[in-house]
Image (tube, grey):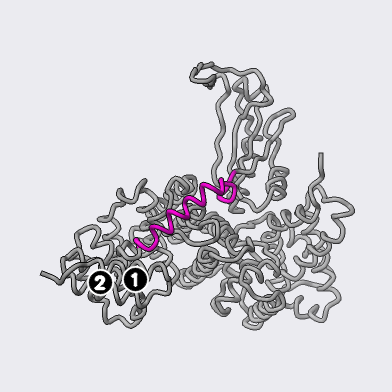
Amino acid sequence: MKFMILVKASKESEAGVMPGKELLAAMGNFNEELVRAGVLLAADGLQRSAKGARVRFSGSKRTVVDGPFTETKELVAGYWIWEVKSMEEAIEWVKRCPNPHEGDSEIEIRPMFDAADFDPEYVAGLVERRERLAAELAAAGRPVPEHLHKKG
Amino acid sequence: MTEPDPHRTIEAVWRIESPRLVAGLARMLRDVGLAEDFAQDALVAALERWPEAGVPDNPGAWLMATAKNRALDHLRRGKLLKKKHEALGWSLESERESAAANFEAALDDDVGDDLLRLVFTACHPVLSHEARVALTLRMLLGLTTGEIARAYLVPEATMAQRLVRAKRSLSEARVPFELPRGADRESRLTSVLEVVYLIFNEGYAATAGSDWTRPQLCAEALRLGRILVGLAPGDAEVHGLVALMEIQASRLAARVGPSGEPILLFDQDRARWDRLLIRRGLEALAAAERLSGARGPYTLQAALAACHACAVTFEETDWMRIARLYDELATLSPSPVVELNRGIAHGMAFGPAAGFEIVDALSAEPALARYHLLPSVRGDLLLKLGRLDEARADFERAAALTANERERAFLRARASGIGGGSV
């Protein structure tokens, strides 16, 4: 299962204060641990919201709002994408993370959608299409599906 | 606020901690089988205590301390005492201190090397493929015997036996807990990569069964591959294998329908391919190619998989590149199926005559004698070449060989759809 791990913003991160040496080192170690455990798929830090923008939608109207945005605790300062087996495993890993800010902070864990979560009707449509095409492909001498030569 | 289910938490902690635990214990005991047993003891203790006492703040340290005490008890009491002492070169007096120090060292010193030693030991050529796979899933990925048994569709008792026998074989063969060096390292690494890919394919080929454990094997193999990249970053084929698995895994969601039936690569909705995994696969492939001028078999297959991953539609597929890569693969690790694919690629890239020349040469190949795709592919190339009678005969032959009803019907229709004789 893939999870997005969202590090919430803090006053400091919104003020553009870069994390101290110690925190950077601790975070570096934590990331290394994630890599060594085969868990880390992607990670990035986000610049402060003052450098961001929002596009608001209202019917067909679009309005651009420039940052900064005020609701600091709801803002995201960075994210990871992890592949783990369960929410519990994600929680265990987050508990091992150093406090991402100098003061109090919060990290949010959100499971990402996967194939099983897709609309069954959409999937059923695919199957119908597949059944129509499968025989055609085999007979048309389209390339042999790769799993046939990857096993040996 | 709800407290998470303690058993699920313990399972999660176990997945995170057990490889390091076993590796650290193995370094101390110089016996992977014993190390695994004591690690299991610690897990049992956790299962007994944590649900009531709560999960400790540092569960990894708790598990290690518990396993360590069990190991020390065993060393002190057990019949193996003398033998172990000789093996370890310890004096009885300093046993406790040195053991403790050894443990700390095992934890702090270079966990990476211990893990790599554990990988090489679990995948040791003295073991059967089955045993290597079982030990790897158990010791490096923290799966329970029950999970491994379900994944391989055997009774739990059978899997438990297999694990016990595997551990016994390791100690009987006196397999040292060490990193192979020199030329030995390469062949041992080949064995490791083979085990990882075996696990991946077991999951990838599984299209039936409601138990999550079989498809889960892909995720486990990929996890192990990603761990290996961290442990042995200088080996091109490690990156190549990870690239191959990342790209194949990117299609997992698109390749199976809701009733578990497979959807062929060319039939897949490419919008459902996982772009993140494709990106990771392409990066791993680039790393493999940077590290070595000559592509190994995994890197080559990853390069082939990348050709499809990079084509947004089937029509955009770069068949020239695929044909060249198959030429390379056919030289490096020739097989009839690689050759058939090479023929198809050449047919797509350079026209039916080029493809036919390669495919026709396979007609006498005994390994493909009952493989319906050979006459099916050959028939298609003949049809494109205007050799209608021969094409018809090949489609008939393919129809007779296939086990799939729908495919047979279509092949028959294709045969009878070829009007009149050749001109």
* Residue at left offset 68%, top offset 76%: B155
Tell me where the magenta segment starts and ends, as one range. Answer: A113-137
| Secondary structure state at the residue bearing disc 2 | helix
Q: Which chain carries label 1?
A: B
The quarter of the displayed image where residue B394 is located: bottom left
Position above or below: A139 against A86: below
| Secondary structure state at the residue bearing disc 1 | helix
* Residue labelled with disc 2: B359
Query: On the same chain: label 1 and label 2?
Result: yes
User: Residue B329: which numbered mark, if any?
Assistant: none
A83 falls in the magenta region: no
* Residue at left offset 59%, top offset 51%: A116
Around disc 1, counting alpha carbons within 10 Å, would you say few (fewer than 14), some (14 to 19), or many (20 or more)? many
A124 falls in the magenta region: yes
The quarter of the displayed image where residue B10 is located: bottom right
Q: Majority secondary structure of the magenta segment? A: helix
Left/right placement of residue B214 relative to residue B25 reads left
* Residue labelled with disc 1: B373
Q: Give percent across and percent down for residue B115.
A: 62, 62
The quarter of the displayed image where residue B3 is located: top right
